[in-house]
Image (cartoon, helix red, strand yellow):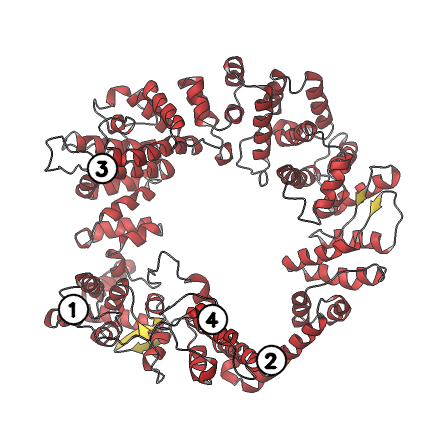
Amino acid sequence: MLMNTNNQAITDVFRNRYLLKLIVNKIQSSGGETIELLGARLPLYIGSSYDALKHWSPQSNDKVFPPLRRRYLHLVQDLEWVIKNKYFGLLKDILTSHLKDVTVTPKLIELTQQCAGDPELMQFLLTNLSHQFREYFGSEKDVNTKDPPLPPVGLITGYLLGIVIHGDIQVWNAIINIINSIQNNNNNININTNATNNKSNESSIPSSSILHLLFRHTQIPETILESKNFTVDMIIKQCIISNKKEILVNIVETIGAKELGAFIDSMAESKHGSMLAVDLFDMDNSNTLVYLYQTLPIKTFSNLFGNPISAILATKDTTTITNYLSNCEIEQVTATNHITQYITYLFKPSPSSSSPSPSFQHISFILNHFAIFNQNESNKVSERMKQLVSPKEEAKGAGLLYCAELYLTMIKHDQHKRELMDQSQHTTTMRDSKQVKILFSICQYLVPALDKEGEEEEEEGKAERYTKRCEYLLDRVGFGFICKLGSLSLVKSSLSLLQSRSFGNQYINLLSNRLEVVEFCGDVICNHQKIAGLEFDIKYLLQALSLAYSRDQWDIIRYIVVMVLPCLDKSKTFIYVTPLLVHRASQLGHHDVVQILSVYVDNYSDFIIMEASNQQQQQQQQQQQTSTTETDPLIKEENQLIETVKNFLDVEGGGIPTDRVIRCWYQYYKDAISRQCYPLIEYLLTIDPMYRTTPPMIELDRPLAMSNFSFVKKLLQSPLNIPLVVALDSTWKIVGMYGTVEWVIQILQKYSPTKWNRSTNLTYIDQLVQGAKMNYKHGSQILKYINENDIIIVDIVHPKSIDYNVFGGNEITYL
């Protein structure tokens, strides 16, 4: 009873427009601070200058900035934004409640392919927007010819490619059925996505399908044939990459395997064709590959891939592999390269859990077939790895481990190569080689893969197997990689083996991201333990500090500096630490670290000057800051930016300013605009004129799109006569959405870059009208103003272009 009463009360409130508006206004006003700009009450922008710089950097080819704050009424007119941001529930709600108010553009229909992952939503769209889909996929009659109209193959192929990427066979069938019905002038559109299950049925395929046209070279004008073929080729390959076997089956059953094969062969022979690289496989698509191999001639199958052996291995099907080997004609050298490329793919850039699981037996089978390996060599690899892998791991599949050892065996990885790899951790000069890169990836895989002594389950022979793993890693990878990537247990066990027997030259380091490992290795280094073949090079200590600094691991940095550095022979310690690391340590209060590192800082005198300048700057800020600035991070940030500029000009501009000073002034001004930092703009415009040049125009488009209305207000009210401009037609829509008539007069009409009138620039007016229709507070006044007035733009006197070439830049009129 109480619930019914509450529901009735809510209904009464929503029926009372005055009360509802009062509540909405109250919610909006209590939602945070607001600002008034030319008669409009707007929410205050909350964000730092860094936010403006990071999230709203103008792109070279795209200077349209969608508004950050969106109201429901705005989104009714901007479904493209709704789809791009994947608000599919909101999309369905708007189309259900406001279908008559929605403007459906061809671009919107194009974007609906992104909804293909939800068959139910796609059926909803095809039902409610059937007329718009008909227009999008429909043919346009050419009045200059009697030939039947040609379907828009460019739009169709692009849309179908999107369905392959985002959707499944249900949505594919629904779209194909709609396109076929349109082209066959059938008014009864079959939009039931459940009409065809995951298996296609030849009896349901229409006699004339759009797929026949797409896979043929006839009836298509030469002007669009090339792009059409390229997109259709992408559809086939995307089906393989995405494991969309059902869609490929539908294509084959519609046009026939012979026609599909002919298309693939023709693309392979053309200059526009491309081979499908196995590197693109990020999921198990073995069933799709097997189907293609069984459907297409072996030559056609090979034409799809730059490395057909890799594709055959990815099928993971013994029958397919055997059949391929008995029919292919590949030389031993080519086969070797193909297998090497496949193993390289498995470990590039690092093994992925979603990558196809390799089969050592299949690879070994191919190696034996081409006499790359004999059976004895394959057996040796298999027996060696069985000593390292537990029965449970073997059952789960340890193909990557086998493939890693197989690759090392193929390239004859010996002690010398292992030592070079161990040293390559400390230098980038050796990593340019492709073989070194793959070896590096294999080493990074092997250490954590075999470092599993901590498993809870007790297994027979576990301790012995762990020792074997340590021996294998020392032999194949080296102690340096173990120190960097291994657990403390693995490092200790490996060091014990080094003390008992020789594994050639080995290296110890402090590169681990685990403090306990760094401490253990540091103790070994500081105690000067004499272990035959184990070396530590002091010059590699800098890399350990750099790595820890990049990971922000100050516990490791502090240990290395305080505990390890003092133990080393200072006559042999030649390292130069970057001042940035020492400066950061000083900021964090690690004074003992700073004191020790001071003798290792490159250009330490410059560092002292920098530190003194920083301390002076901090003191000045502390004196200038009020209680407000101490609690307001935005004001504090603005003050820091201004102080940085002041310090630079004080140092560089002592006398007559150089071109460098003026160029830097321009860069600071440009940065202030990007950050939307008005105090810095004001400071730069009020300093001695000899330090600055004519300021470029500031575009109001970005701050308006970001809803940074406080920044816009400061610019408009500034007594400095800052040159402003509205450069984009999209800004007219934003003004209509949020502004008042005063915005039109004081912003749009005053700061347009050119003089024009309503009759010559309807695009701008249309944008303003669209925005005003979504402005429930001031929109009617704006529309009335548009209807009653010719919007004449005040002519702006632009500042002359400044030739910045003398400063090493380009000629720039405004930003």
Q: Earlier in the sequence, mark 3 or mark 1?
A: 3
Residue in the image at 63% along x and 79% along y: 613
* Residue 47 seen in render: no
Q: Amino acid at mark 2?
A: Gln
Label 1 CA crowd tier, 10 Å (few <14, some 14–19, many 20+): some
Q: Position of residue 516 (x, y in %)?
A: 75, 53
Q: Secondary structure at mark 4?
A: helix
Q: Earlier in the sequence, mark 4 or mark 1?
A: 4
Give the labeled residue for mark 2: 618
**Image depth: mark 1 or mark 2 in front:** 1
Q: Secondary structure at mark 2?
A: helix
* Residue 555 seen in render: yes
The number of numbered badges drawn on the structure is 4
Residue 113: quarter of image: top left
Q: Amino acid at mark 3?
A: Pro
Q: Is residue 311 left or right of residue 146?
A: right
Q: Amino acid at mark 4?
A: Gln
Give the labeled residue for mark 1: 757
Give the labeled residue for mark 4: 667
Q: Quadrant of the N terminus?
A: bottom left
Q: Amino acid at mark 1?
A: Asn
Give the labeled residue for mark 3: 152
Q: Relative to 570, does residue 100 appear above or below in the rendering?
A: above
Q: Secondary structure at mark 3?
A: loop
